[in-house]
Image: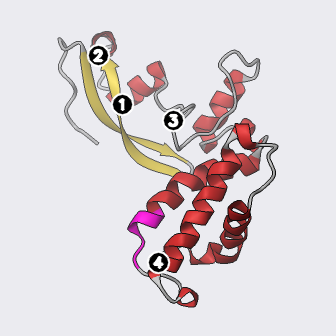
Amino acid sequence: MKDELPEVGTDIVYAEHHVDMPYVDYYECIEIDKEDIKNFYAEGDRRDMWAYTRRNIKEDDLWRKENVNFSLAQANNPNWREYEEQRRVRGFDDTETWSLDITIAKFILPRLKVFKDVTEGYPACFGSEEAWQETLDDMIYWLERYVDEDNFLASEDERETRGRKAFAEYFSSLWW
């Protein structure tokens, strides 16, 4: 966390701050408006700038942060404030459980793609890295089709079946 405060006079200051939430621990970059800085100094105390900013511009809400939050809530939902608080407290809101299978698939898919690129080696039962990479491709293909809303009612093709079965069978092999 930074000790020095941003200077007044800039239109926007980019500041790094630490986000503490259950199951989430990371640094992110936020925009602090010049007015926020003036208001902070005008209050006369030396409170934490990051806490002030988070309270006033709600940058800690993970709603619609790609690949982190999969909320189905819309801002005009009557339960919006409740969902917003759930995201702040536990990192996700109830709407992510409406179609938990899709939420989980959307979470896994981009990570599985990166895993395929960075993994070194392969499970011994495959005999070659090429066979493992082909199996990972089938898993990725299945997940891509699974989360595709246009494909929801389509019947599963042979490759999807292979990918689904491989994911279940080799789930415990997804490490490096």
Taking the spot 70% from the left edge, 50% from the top edge, the residue there is 146
Residue 24 visible in the current orientation: yes
Residue 48 visible in the current orientation: no
Location of residue 110 in the rendering, given as x and y in whole percent from the top left corner: 52, 52
Residue 74, picture quadrant: top right
Mark 4 belongs to which amino acid? Glu
Residue under pointer 1: 50
Q: Earlier in the sequence, mark 1 or mark 4?
A: 1
Residue under pointer 3: 65
Mark 2 belongs to which amino acid? Ile
Taking the spot 45% from the left edge, 80% from the top edge, the residue there is 129
Q: Secondary structure at mark 4?
A: helix
Q: Any mark on residue 89, and which?
A: none
Q: Do the CB atoms of the residues marked 3 and 1 lie less than 8 Å apart? A: no
Q: CA distance from mark 3 to mark 2?
A: 25 Å
Mark 3 belongs to which amino acid? Lys
Q: Do the CB atoms of the residues marked 1 and 4 lie less than 8 Å apart? A: no
